[in-house]
Image: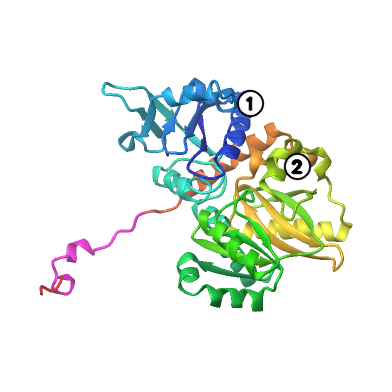
Amino acid sequence: MKTVGVFFGSRSPEHDVSIITGHLVISGLIKLGFSVQAVYIDTNGKWLVGEKVNSLKYFTDPKLNPELKKIMDVSLDLSASNKVVNLQEKKLLAGKNYSIDIAFPAFHGQYGEDGTFQGMCEMLNIPYVGCDTTSSAVAMDKVLTKLLYKADDIPTTRFVHFTRYEWDTDNNAIIAKIQKEVGTNTIVKPARLGSSIGIAKAKNKKDLVQAIEVALHYDDKVIVEETVEPLVDITCAVLGGENPKASCLQESLFSSDVFSYEDKYLNDGGVQLGNAKSNIVIPARLDKETTAKIRDMAVRIFKLIGCNGTARVDFLYNPKTKKYYANEVNTMPGTLYHHLWKASGVELSELLQTLINLAELRHKAKSTLTHTFKSSLLSMANSQKLQLKKS
């Protein structure tokens, strides 16, 4: 039987959310009869495996949490990792080996959801669940995502983006550009972070500067967008490969200025975790025509970015103007947004099995491609034209 490795945690501000998603996936795959190997990456970047890593209580119970620090960490054995992920305990004498056939990344944010882990899987030539290296990297970057929207005539809010270097060099020019191109009412975000971490609204110059400084604490690239008011937050999940399908739409209710981390994960169990029933409306309270357009647009965006497996596409809707704007794409939604798929008629077991199937299909398809090219270049290496000039 093939072993599925569920990878979660990592050096990301969204580390804790990843633990929840990872253990949902572990539990679901075990119920489906898969052999599962949990791999936890802590906030220092250490890779840990073992029975304790398989149990959520060691992460949620303060009394048990110190036990995780006693676990022997493992390293990636590159000499034995070809079409498998081979992990080796770091011991003076021969430590235990863990072999993984299919990778199921359950990361959120940097160092896992951003294409870094996916690139490793490509190098090791193993099947992995979810979006590939390129689509993961693009979707993680809100700036690149919105530039793609503009290039493909997809409606999105006006925005300005800049780096820490540009801000430090001439922040007055950037503020002037924001006020001219975006307006006074803005929302400031780290460009490559999720879960509403580091996000704030600004209605004047003082708030804007403060919000930008906070965002730069989490990322060296920032995006400033115009706000949509009044706002209805709409979410659509997408599942598939070449012929993806859209879920029904979710409307998320929140009382603060932004859809905060607390709204998403803590208050009443969390909207993004599907637990805050009073703050979730499924299906969203939109007319049939608007609902159909947003669902179609979600699939179009999924294909445009090159997603595979599942993704969540967020939209901003103005009920007064009846206009909607494509917002962010999340290539590994918290808890896979299984509550929205359940409301759409797809149970968690079917969702997980579909994701595994899609991973294997993509890997099989890639194996048919030619990855080598014969040339006479090396035989001509001694020719005069290819010789480096000596100074």
Say the numbered circle drawn on residue 32.
1
What amino acid type is highlighted by mark number 2?
Leu
Q: Position of residue 99 (x, y in %)?
A: 42, 29
Residue at x 86%, y 62% (from the top left corner) = 319
Callout 1, which amino acid?
Answer: Leu
Report x, y in % for residue 54. Answer: 54, 24
Pointer 2 local density, CA inside 10 Å: few below 14, some 14–19, many at least 20 = many
162 lies left or right of 150: left
Is 219 positioned to the left or the right of 261 in the image?
A: left
Is residue 244 visible in the rendered image? The answer is: yes
Query: On screen, 385 above or below 164?
Result: below
Q: Secondary structure at mark 1?
A: loop
Residue at 70% across, 72% down: 184
Residue 236, image x, y percentages: 73, 51
**What is the spatial separation of the Cα atoms under label 1 and label 2, in whole angstroms?**
20 Å
Residue appearing at x 73%, y 34% in the figure: 347
Q: Quadrant of the C terminus?
A: bottom left
Question: Residue 8 versus residue 246: which sits nearer the camera?
Answer: 8
Residue receiving disc 2: 340
Instruction: Please say whether residue 232 is one of the residues in the magenta stretch.
Output: no
Q: Which residues are magenta?
A: 372-387
- Residue 17: x, y in percent? 60, 39
Instruction: Residue at 63%, 31% (x, y): give it.
Output: 24
